[in-house]
Amino acid sequence: MIRITQEPVSIDHGRICTKPTGTLAAHRDGTMAYQILKAHNTSGDMEHLTLKVDAMASHDITYVGIIQTARASGMQAFPLPYVLTNCHNSLCAVGGTINEDDHLFGLSAAQKYGGEFVPPHMAVIHQYMREMYAGCGRMILASDSHTRYGALGTLSVGEGGPELAKQLLGRTYDLPYPDVMAVYLTGEPQPGVGPQDVALALIGATFKQGIVKNKVLEFIGPGIAKLNMDFRLGIDVMTTETACLSSVWQTDETVQRFLARHGRADAYKPLSPADVATYDGLIEIDLSTIEPMIALPFHPSNAYTIAELKANAADILHQADEQIEQQLGRKPEVSLVSKLVDGQIHVDQGVVAGCSGGLYQNVLRVHEILQQGSIGTGAFTFSVYPSSQPIMMQLSKKGVIADLMAQGVIVRSAFCGPCFGAGDVPGNGALSIRHTTRNFPNREGSKPGEGQIAYVALMDARSIAATAQNGGVLTAANELAQPPVEPDVDDYVFDPSPYEHRVYRGVGHPQAKQALKLGPNITDWPEMIPLPEDLDLTVASAIYDPVTTTDELIPSGETSSYRSNPLRLAEYALSRKDPGYVGRAKAVFAKEQQRRKDGTSSIGLGTLVFALKPGDGSAREQAASCQRVLGGVANICEEYATRRYRANVINWGMLPFTLKDAASYGIETGDVVELRGVRRAIAQGAEDIDATLVKPDGTRKPLPLQCKGLLPNEREVLLAGCLMNYYKQQSHA
């Protein structure tokens, strides 16, 4: 049972009080989130936060661009602990030497600027940060959307690269004080229910309605004590898919033992709300009512109980096929309904991996379940990726790895690939069930634009193992004769020797004379001009999907290899959603370059992307920077799906316009939006921007754009043309 209250709620000495009034309503400062944000705020104004974080992290498809941005802006050394992990392009399988060139760049940067470098296959980014950096009351910023260490008492946020570059330059992470919503846990999970089941139930109940968008989720209540540490971490990391800003949990002896086990007992302190704390809303979850879940393609919020799906398989799969056809714009050759044979849903592949799936307790439950049956010699395959080398070592010492291999499971090293389309790519038309973070199209490695299509459904490791031992027939873990029960005592022993022997730890010890190792694919950012006074912007793409993901703005998977080369990567912009976008953008950009060369006109030329709700999903800055390096100057939408995508748009110097009832204006590819005096309007703080929509036939009509909520420094970034230009101007002032 999940019950949601979308109005202020107070927790008064453990008692829930709806519609608090008077003194009770004033206790917003009683939340854990308030106390952590206050401790990191430098502005003195809790309504307008300017935050300095304790540590940062990036992986090998983001850190090159971030360091290049900060270097171009004058950075001399990392001013705070900055961890560079290598868990995305660690296979070095695409693009020749360029993946390993990025790793060599990362090591040389850690040496030169004083950072921490975690070599490939050692750990996925979030597991390493849990093990080595998260602590109670801390704040961590990382360039990956699933940056969630709330279960360890850390308020952590995944953001685009420019926000990390700001910290490297001694600046702050700025945002209005966010709403804080309580997640009140009661009860205890049933046998066979795992953290992904709780997470998918929460996502399904909140995402589509935007209930927690850009809010902080604060987990409290007696149910927390019933969850082991890995169970909490598994729920927490998936809160990203609710579209919340961050999360934090009350802490207890379980957290204390985890931190002490990892040699960091001093990182623990008890965290809990004040005796009276007022929240902006409440989500009540009775853990005992949660059942094994499945999220069908193509979003984690497309969630059902497995029992419901199996009871209504034909209808639900048919509905999913219709949604898939609408999202892809065509009918796939292989449907999900075809997976229903003789009343049973047949699955082709199982994967347990990454920061959500590859945790110690998840792998132990997989091991326990597979003792009850065999994967078999059919088409079904099963891979397990423990999320760090220390976890792999402990599983090996217990004999779990050998047993899994004997059962036919493929055990792999720590790798994020199955989460973003670069590992265990299934065959065309296949259905893969995965305990990973996302199931967007192309996240399994298929290429819908080339006729290759595969499907990912998200499930918990326990039900994936139950399906595996049933030969690939969809099976919930609670259907087993002996569903697994979560242990009261965690026997995990952390051995740090892999890190001690291989991780480069140079935090606070920069070596200025160390040369950066720049492979042939690593290039500097191209020039980006300041915002002109007047603009004519051609609509290079118009997207009317309900939501546009960052995967659709710039695909994941094989394109990640080119993220150190801005212009080469930009060739893939919108390639799955609108293959003609790059050509159209380049044509306008060429005219703008000629205009600047000739000086024949004062009106700047550029392009914009129109979408109803862009930016769901990954924090990757390239979803915006690829538009910018192709001459993009603006986005127009009804609303932005996430704060982080809007921040990326701003930091790359693109105007973040919104338009009320946007679909009613009939904006189409090839239209032109005329903006006169736009630079002056932005400089003066105007929020209503007059524009004119010009159709190819010459028809003109007003377009009442808005540019609301810009902070003063964000306006300066837009005027300068991008974050790098802004910092260059400051250094020369």
Image (cartoon, helix red, strand yellow):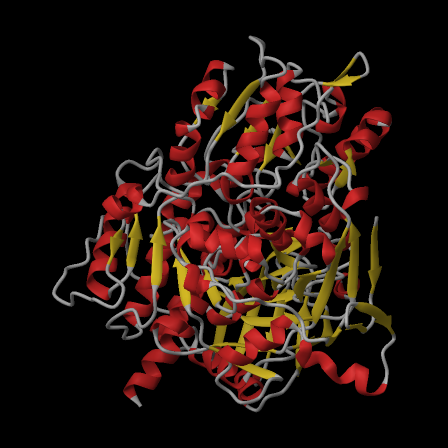
Q: Is residue 560 left or right of residue 544?
A: left
Q: Is residue 656 above or below residue 402?
A: below
Q: Is residue 403 left or right of residue 338?
A: left
Residue 431 appears in the picture as rendered:
no
Q: Position of residue 227 (x, y in %)?
A: 65, 47
Q: Position of residue 93 (x, y in %)?
A: 35, 33
Q: Position of residue 291 (x, y in %)?
A: 77, 37
Q: Position of residue 111 (x, y in %)?
A: 20, 59
Q: Is residue 415 above or below residue 399?
A: below
Residue drawn at point x = 46 percent, y = 41 percent: 416
Q: How many marks?
A: 0
Q: Is residue 71 above or below residue 719?
A: above
Quadrant of the rendered image containing residue 430: top right
Residue drawn at point x = 29 percent, y = 70 percent: 72
Q: Considering depth in this image, is 346 or 661 the residue closer to the camera?
A: 346
Quadrant of the rendered image containing residue 595: bottom left
- Extreme residue toward the left, this view: 513
Q: Considering depth in this image, is 503 or 15 the residue closer to the camera?
A: 15
Q: Is residue 302 left or right of residue 716?
A: right
Residue 32 appears in the picture as rendered:
yes
Quarter of the image with the C terminus is bottom left
